[in-house]
Image (spheres, rainbow, N blue to C red):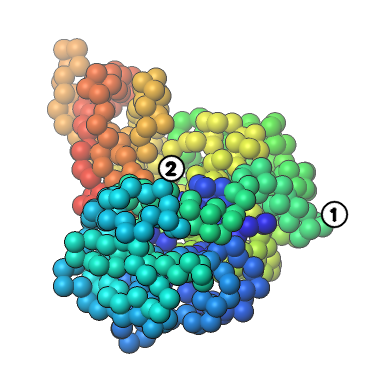
């Protein structure tokens, strides 16, 4: 990569969001642990460094610290919230408990609308979340913004190119946050802004080719989801038919998805493709099981066992691959490792059991939206790339109680109707996630002249930016009416349809 913004993670809840916002500006960024050695940081030759927020006070015993020499390295630095307070403390300023804490959207007055604040209005709504604040700037710094209760809401030393903001420019609640980030990236760090999915794909293909060599073979666990499908397409572009994909079909995917996966990787990307039809095995092992966690355990165990059996029948393969994405890497504390190939990585024990010591993870530095963009760049079908988020255990977690082939058919057909009508209404790109749930509730109904006693299907549709919180989607009444009528009329053993109007929290998005 020609440009790089490193984000030092102090445990802030918005750290991943900072990285995403930087990448949205076509600048490549990575999140690394706050305690990454300074020399390791300098060896990466970053264009700029961002210090994230964090839950600690800079005065706490054992609070995260960085080497103060980082501020003399000539690299532009932006401290956000905790990052600003740490900068002030390390460089000789004062940080004290605020007399009035500030949380939520607060009006910030810009005292110096140059440099980092170039182009911002005099007063702007910004998102605050702090109990401590800078009360005295370090030598060489001056305050550039203030609020009613925070006299130093931003500070900077233009000569050193070190900046700090108490508010969070990365969240959408900060009205002009993107302008501030653009100033830092392009005016201060002088980034070219030429990072895109085409460039990433070309670099990743070359890395895979270099790692695998001219004769190496790769085995990939293809779940049928977006991540593993995009990983398969990318590796296929790099090594062609030397990629073998094993698709374990547990019989719990949505309508048409198994056939779609088989078509894509038999025709559009003709890898060596093996479909293990194990639905009978999964349903047999799930018989009588009602506990959600036990269901998940059984499905995960069976998946590994079926995959292991198929993999061993193939003979020796050189590399194991999977679709790990960047949030998984950050959350596992591995954000400092930027390699596409990571040695001795162990996921669920499976690669090691099969004799692999090296793992290929070509998506490990991408966020979900970037994975989708890469998928389209590679030529995967739009409907596959932009399909709804789907849990690993599949429809099993959308069936309350025992999972049977009959119940699976009910929820699969109901879900298909719901998705068809959402798409027909042109709302599929406006709702973050939507699906049907087969409740374990049966109720009295009347069909024709007959009394029925059948299942209730619940519809779940939510809007969210990050899936950490979610609101229920306000679907048009006529749409809900069509969906309900179609499900009751077209899906056997359903007599009632209800709508879930619960936010997250307190509810989760999935029912189990």
Considering the numbered disc 1 on the image, is that residue within a helix, a strand or a loop?
Answer: loop
Considering the numbered disc 2 on the image, is that residue within a helix, a strand or a loop?
Answer: loop
Q: Position of residue 39 (x, y in %)?
A: 62, 79
Nearest the camera: 372 or 453?
372
Q: Position of residue 426 (x, y in %)?
A: 39, 23
Q: Quadrant of residue 94?
A: bottom left
Label 2 Cα neighbours within 10 Å, binned few <14 / some 14-19 / many ≥20: few
Q: Residue at x 77, y 48 (%)?
A: 239
Q: Position of residue 128 (x, y in %)?
A: 27, 60
Q: Position of residue 233 (x, y in %)?
A: 66, 42
Q: Quadrant of residue 52?
A: bottom left
Label for residue 479? Answer: none
**Residue at the farthest bottom position:** 61
- Judged left or right of residue 66, residue 235 is right
- Judged left or right of residue 104, residue 13 is right
Residue 451 appears in the rendering: yes
Residue linked to disc 2: 389
Do tag 1 and tag 2 residues touch (Cβ < 8 Å)?
Answer: no
Residue 287 appears in the rendering: no
Label 1 Cα neighbours within 10 Å, binned few <14 / some 14-19 / many ≥20: few
- Judged left or right of residue 4, residue 255 is left
Quadrant housing the N terminus: bottom right
Q: Residue at x 23, y 61 (%)?
A: 147
Of mark 1 and mark 2, the one earlier in the sequence is: 1
Residue linked to disc 1: 214
**Residue at the farthest top position:** 448
Q: Residue at x 29, y 68 (%)?
A: 152
């Amino acid at each position: 990569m020609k440009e790089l913004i490193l984000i030092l993670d102090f445990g802030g809840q918005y750290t991943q969001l900072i990285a995403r916002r930087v990448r949205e500006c076509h600048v490549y960024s990575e999140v690394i642990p706050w305690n990454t050695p300074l020399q390791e940081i300098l060896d990466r030759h970053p264009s700029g460094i961002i210090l994230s927020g964090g839950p600690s006070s800079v005065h706490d015993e054992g609070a995260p610290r960085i080497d103060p020499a980082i501020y003399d390295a000539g690299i532009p630095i932006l401290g956000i919230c905790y990052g600003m307070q740490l900068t002030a403390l390390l460089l000789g300023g004062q940080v004290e408990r605020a007399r009035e804490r500030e949380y939520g959207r607060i009006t910030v007055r810009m005292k110096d609308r140059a440099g980092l604040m170039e182009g911002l209005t005099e007063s702007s709504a910004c998102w605050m979340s702090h109990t401590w604040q800078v009360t005295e700037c370090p030598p060489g710094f001056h305050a550039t913004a203030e609020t009613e209760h925070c006299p130093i809401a931003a500070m900077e030393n233009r000569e050193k190119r070190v900046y700090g903001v108490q508010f969070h420019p990365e969240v959408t609640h900060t009205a002009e946050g993107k302008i501030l980030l653009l100033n830092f990236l392009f005016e201060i760090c002088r980034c070219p802004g030429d990072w895109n999915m085409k460039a990433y794909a070309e670099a990743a293909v070359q890395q895979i080719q270099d790692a695998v060599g001219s004769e190496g073979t790769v085995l990939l666990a293809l779940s049928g989801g977006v991540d593993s499908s995009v990983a398969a397409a990318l590796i296929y572009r790099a090594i062609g038919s030397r990629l073998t994909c094993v698709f374990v079909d547990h019989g719990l995917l949505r309508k048409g998805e198994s056939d779609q996966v088989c078509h894509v990787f038999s025709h559009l990307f003709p890898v060596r493709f093996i479909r293990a039809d194990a639905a009978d095995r999964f349903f047999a092992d799930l018989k009588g099981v009602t506990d959600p966690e036990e269901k998940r355990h059984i499905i995960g165990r069976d998946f590994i066992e079926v995959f292991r059996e198929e993999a061993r029948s193939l003979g020796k393969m050189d590399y194991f691959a999977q679709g790990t994405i960047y949030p998984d890497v950050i959350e596992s504390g591995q954000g400092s490792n930027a390699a596409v190939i990571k040695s001795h990585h162990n996921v669920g024990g499976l690669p090691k059991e099969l004799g692999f010591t090296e793992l290929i993870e070509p998506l490990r530095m991408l966020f979900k939206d970037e994975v989708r963009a890469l998928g389209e760049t590679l030529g995967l079908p739009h409907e596959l790339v932009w399909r709804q988020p789907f849990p690993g255990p599949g429809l099993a977690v959308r069936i309350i109680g025992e999972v049977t082939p009959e119940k699976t058919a009910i929820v699969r057909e109901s879900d298909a109707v719901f998705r068809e009508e959402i798409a027909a209404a042109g709302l599929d790109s406006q709702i973050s996630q939507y699906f049907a749930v087969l409740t374990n509730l049966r109720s009295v109904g009347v069909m024709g002249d007959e009394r029925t006693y059948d299942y209730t299907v619940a519809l779940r549709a939510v809007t969210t930016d990050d899936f950490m919180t979610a609101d229920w989607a306000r679907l048009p009444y006529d749409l809900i009416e069509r969906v309900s009528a179609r499900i009751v009329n077209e899906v056997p053993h359903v007599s009632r349809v209800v709508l879930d109007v619960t936010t997250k929290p307190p509810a989760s998005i999935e029912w189990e």
